[in-house]
Image (cartoon, rainbow, N blue to C red):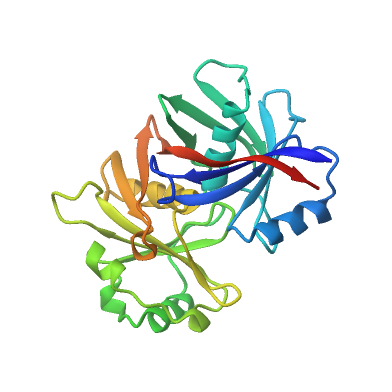
Amino acid sequence: MSRRFTQVDVFTATALLGNPLAVVHDAQGLADEQMQAFARWTNLSETTFLLPPTDPAADYHVRIFTPHRELPFAGHPTLGSCHAWLEAGGAPKAEGEVVQQCAVGLIRIRRSGERLAFAAPPCLRTGPLEDEVLAQITRALSLTHADILGHQWVDNGPGWSAVRLASANAVLALSPDWAALNGLKLGVVGPHAAGHDAQFEVRALIGEGAGYEDPVTGSLNASLGQWLIGSGVAPEAYVAAQGTCLQRRGRVFIERVAGQVWVGGSSVSCVRGEVTL
């Protein structure tokens, strides 16, 4: 059966500079094994499948797969899936807001011009990293304990840990030992100097399989925003740059309004067609 297909570049207004996402529309009838097989075949960080909602408060239901497993929530698939759903004619129940159903529950998505922003879900795990985890990170990144100005579990589903360095340049200079990361999903953040269009530089280092760096990561930036704003390190609104080391130019717009952190960015559809599954 042929189904509508969109490949979206997320967290960028210019194609090929963000994080790509494969979106399969009208995915009802597909078995879990078929979804996983297609996600493995696309070999993108995530592939999503749009379904009718089962919760009456939601506008659509999305399932999110990496090449290896299903995720309960992820940020760039949330914005990219919403972009593709709207572009395909999706009509939200409420003006100015879309409600996405996924495995962690209902996610609110604001519409502001061409930019979408999702409400950051609460973290499932917070608090400082354990000594053994911190030691693993310093080994993997060739850092000393003094280089790390702050550290935290920032897990909102995928399992993120995070460390804060003194500068964006220190973040960009890292050359990870992927084997030493050994299963960790690590976010590293540091401030840019005045005059840069972004206030922080972020890198997402994933020690799964052979290890890789994610270009632009919504879930990580969501929980980093909660941590950085909540601890007074970041202002109530800021821009994070990500993907620089991968020749991308992702920009993530973080804002806290009435206690709720919102994670925003632009999306561009690059490929439109059909897929037979």
Closer to the camera in the image, 169 or 269: 269
Which residue is rendered at x = 84% and y = 41% of the image?
1
Q: Quadrant of residue 144?
A: bottom left
> Is residue 120 rendered to the left or right of residue 171?
right
Residue 267 percent location from the top left of the image: 46, 39
> Is residue 215 rendered to the left or right of residue 197?
right
Residue 39 percent location from the top left of the image: 69, 56
Q: How many marks are shown on the rendered structure? A: 0
Which residue is rendered at x = 31% and y = 78% of the image?
145
> Is residue 119 rendered to the left or right of residue 94?
left
Residue 44 percent location from the top left of the image: 59, 58
Which residue is rendered at x = 40% and y = 84% of the image?
139
Seen in the picture, residue 216 relative to 97 is either above or below; the reply is below
* Name of the residue lying farthest toward the left: 194
Closer to the camera in the image, 187 or 257: 187
> Is residue 83 rendered to the left or right of residue 23?
left
Residue 59 percent location from the top left of the image: 66, 26
Closer to the camera in the image, 93 or 115: 115
Closer to the camera in the image, 9 or 93: 9
Which residue is rendered at x = 22% and y = 46% of the image?
197
